[in-house]
Amino acid sequence: MKNKVFRALQLFSFDNNNYCGFTSSAAKAVAGKDILLCIWNLEGTELLAISGQQGLTINRSADQLEITSKDTQGGYKSYLPGMKEWSIDNDGLYVPNDQSHRILSQVFESGDPVCIKVVDGKRKMGMFGGLACVTDYPIEAPYDDAVTYSLTLSGMGQLVDLQVDPVSPDTMPDGTAALEPLTVVSVAGSTAGGTNVYVNPTLGASNKYYYRTGAAPLAYPSYGETISETEWDGTSELAGLTAGNQIMIIETDGTGKALKAGAAEITTKTE
């Protein structure tokens, strides 16, 4: 009986969420096609997305150290993590004349390490970075299909999580900087249907704010993209927005070119 009542309460809850309240923004999912493996050229002046890439796997593991003794509680074995290691497996279509593959071939022959970076190409932000060596780089040329490559990069030292320890500038493979993140919060305004928006860090000198709204998730602009949405002074209460949608605040330079952006779910004052 208790379970029946609980299920009934669930149904009412989801009806109120119109319907069922489970969106891509709630799931926080990331499309695999947006994640790119990149390498720096040997001078460290240019970040290159590996050409033709299709599959990408980031492997992270630690040695297993058994610490079981006769008095281990419950008769179960116990373990501690030991030394950690990482590697990256990548594969795709082989493009022999591309600079990225020329560098990979060069460091494979020389045994020199290469600096890698995994980036989220859609959100223009770094995910992981580290030093690695090429330990496997076969090329397949079947008679009835395209030439392909597979690649294994074995880590040397730490794989840095750039979402935990972000870097500035956060270079993208096209050589441009990435959008810096803004923390955006939406709260109910003072009038019916109004919302107040707070942004951190505050607006830079001579910069401007623009905003866009719509169903989540909103697309982020590219760094340096000219923004044509509604300008906002950074303090005025906004009206006419739809609760539950997203609002994105975009900070630009004085000419309207995007520098920073962040989004939040819209909260409005009800009657």
Image (cartoon, rainbow, N blue to C red):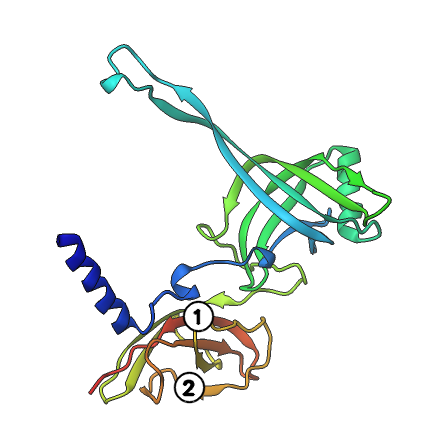
Q: Position of residue 16 (x, y in %)?
A: 25, 73
Q: Which residue is pictured at 66% across the width and 44% down the height?
A: 90
Instruction: Residue 60: give x, y in percent of width and height.
Output: 51, 37
Say above or below: 251 vs 105: below
Q: Nearer the viewer, mark 2 or mark 1?
A: 1
- Which residue lies under the disc numbered 2? 232
Q: Place residue 126 in its image quadrant.
A: bottom right
Q: Nearer the viewer, residue 13 or 156?
A: 13
Give the residue at x 22% y 86%: 190
Q: Is residue 177 left or right of residue 163?
A: right
Percent position of residue 120, x then y: 56, 58
Q: Nearer the viewer, residue 168 or 142?
A: 142
Q: Residue furthest top?
A: 70
Q: How many marks?
A: 2
Against 147, is 249 above or below? below
Mark 2 near mark 1, Cβ–Cβ under 8 Å?
A: no
Q: Secondary structure at mark 2?
A: strand
Say which residue label 1 marks: 262
Of 13 and 232, which appears nearest the observer?
A: 13
How far is disc 2 from disc 1 in space, using C-alphas?
14 Å
- Are there few (<14), some (14-19), or many (20+) residues within 10 Å of tag 1? many
* 65 to the left or right of 153: left
> Residue at horizontal 43%, vertical 60%?
28
At numbered mark 1, what does the secondary structure look like: helix, strand or loop? strand
The quadrant in which residue 195 appears is bottom left
**For residue 237, side relative to residue 182 (left or right):** left
In the displayed image of the protein, which residue is found farthest to the right?
143
